[in-house]
Image (spheres, rainbow, N blue to C red):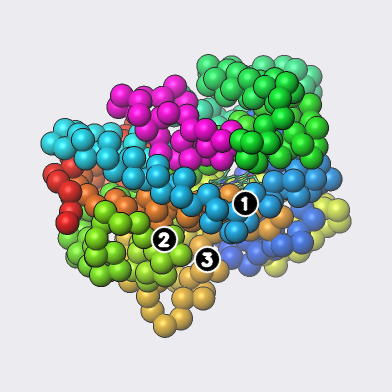
Amino acid sequence: MHLHDLHRNYGPVVRIGPNELHFSTAEAYKDIYHHGSKFLKDEGFYEMFGESLGSFGTVDPVFHRTRRDTMNPLFSRRAILKFESSIRARANQLMQVLSSKQGQLIDLSSAFRAMTLDVIYDYIYGEDAGAISCPDFEHPIISNTEAVNVGAGVQRHMSIVVRQSSLPDFIRRRIVMSIFPDLIKVIETRAIEFFERKAKVQLADEGETILSRIVDIENPFLQSLIEETQTLTFAGTDTVANACFTGCFYVHSDPEILKKVRGELKEAWPDPNMDLPYDTLEKLPYLTAVIKESLRLSHGVPVGLLRVVGPDSAVVGGYQVPQGTIVSVGATFMHWNPQVFPEPFKFNPDRWLQEQTRELDTYLVPFSRGPRQCIGMNLAWCELFLILGHLFRKLDIEIKDLTIQDMQDIRFYFVSVLAGAKHLRGIVKGALA
Ligand code: HEM
């Protein structure tokens, strides 16, 4: 929020570090994050995640291209459609677990995280993490994720300090490991098990997973595999879960929106005991609008994603910026733009149902844009339609504890977190016919 104040006071470009500029305009966003951009990720910031040997953390464009080329086929729409039945099975499992707790107060934030963790584990390893079936969804990865989110927020600010220092790599890594608690160990152990098993037997009969594909094609160092697993686990869990809990909260807080989304779903899906394919769900205009609003107000990654101007100086948002300058535009400057999204803090699916929504789509950037755009977009969309589609069609839920004010009191760590790390809770009142 402070950055929004700075831009209100000083205009569209603000110097926020010795060598760092933050911009507020869509023009600057396009200049920084367009496809074909040669700006690289900022090493000082990204190395703090301890994932420099994975697709997200690397700043090396050659290694990045190789890893993306290896993983891309498994993230194509076609590949995700093949995986759809597994996601649906998990969505059904989640609905059953929630139904079985009818009348009890349920931590829905953790429930969504359990679902998304199981999906991403299944995609990485070919088997889930068992999180949906954990009592109260208390899987160690989920319970520790909040600490990671706070750690990532600390890193965002610490990176400025560490970047200025000449600390050796092993000390920088130790700082990262101390911020991220036991969690890294849990993820690491699972990756090592996989690597050792894969070395012993050909896992051909288990089908291709992301890890097996990386091992087969790149034959990487174990550390690279561990860091990729870390990346995929974090990237694939909270992001999707945040959009789910945002949608779940706002839809259940507004009887009019709830009625519309349920009505649309009931017409397309008369018998909730039958399966409804993803490609039918994604054609439902109102559900689509609800999901876009959920992505808009959960932001994906709200903080500025730091890029370094290069290889030469460049024009960013109308300003000539020297080569080597760190630049960014936070997603909130797109998602809360009142000219494009009037009453930007209001959850209003109808804004996506007007004649012309092209401009709105241009401003919706939860997955970022350009060469470092999210690789998991197709998977994320499929999960969002299946999870929220099942939830709104099958369960009658009453939201508890959180208010709209709580939802707007966000801390911008790497992903957004509600102040006080509050969770969404609710009571399942019954199943919908
Ligand atoms: C609603 C869900 C999601 C949102 C909003 C989201 C958002 C983002 C954003 C903003 C980035 C760019 C980060 C940066 O530049 O530093 C990113 C990168 C990435 N995301 Fe996602 N993500 C989502 C789901 C997923 C899923 C399900 C996966 C699956 C594993 C995934 C994997 C990745 C990876 C590997 C990267 C790094 C890509 C690269 O640098 O080439 N994401 N995501």
| C-alpha separation, residue under disc 1 versus residue under disc 2 | 18 Å
Give, as a three-letter code, the residue at label 3: Tyr
Determine which residue is flagged by label 1: 75
**Dot in front, 1 or 2:** 2
Q: Is residue 170 above or below residue 301?
A: above
| C-alpha separation, residue under disc 1 versus residue under disc 3 | 23 Å
Determine which residue is flagged by label 2: 277
Determine which residue is flagged by label 3: 363
Residue 52 image offset from top left, x and y in percent: 73, 33
Disc ID at residue 100: none
Give, as a three-letter code, the residue at label 1: Phe
Give, as a three-letter code, the residue at label 2: Pro
- Work out whether mark 2 precedes mark 3 in sequence or the reverse, and give the earlier one: 2
Please tell me which residue lies in front, 394 or 291: 394
Q: Do the residues labelled 1 and 2 touch (CB within 8 Å)?
A: no
Q: Is residue 166 above or below residue 272?
A: above
Main secondary structure of the magenta stretch: helix
- Work out whether mark 1 precedes mark 3 in sequence or the reverse, and give the earlier one: 1
Task: Give the magenta part as a residue range.
Answer: 114-141
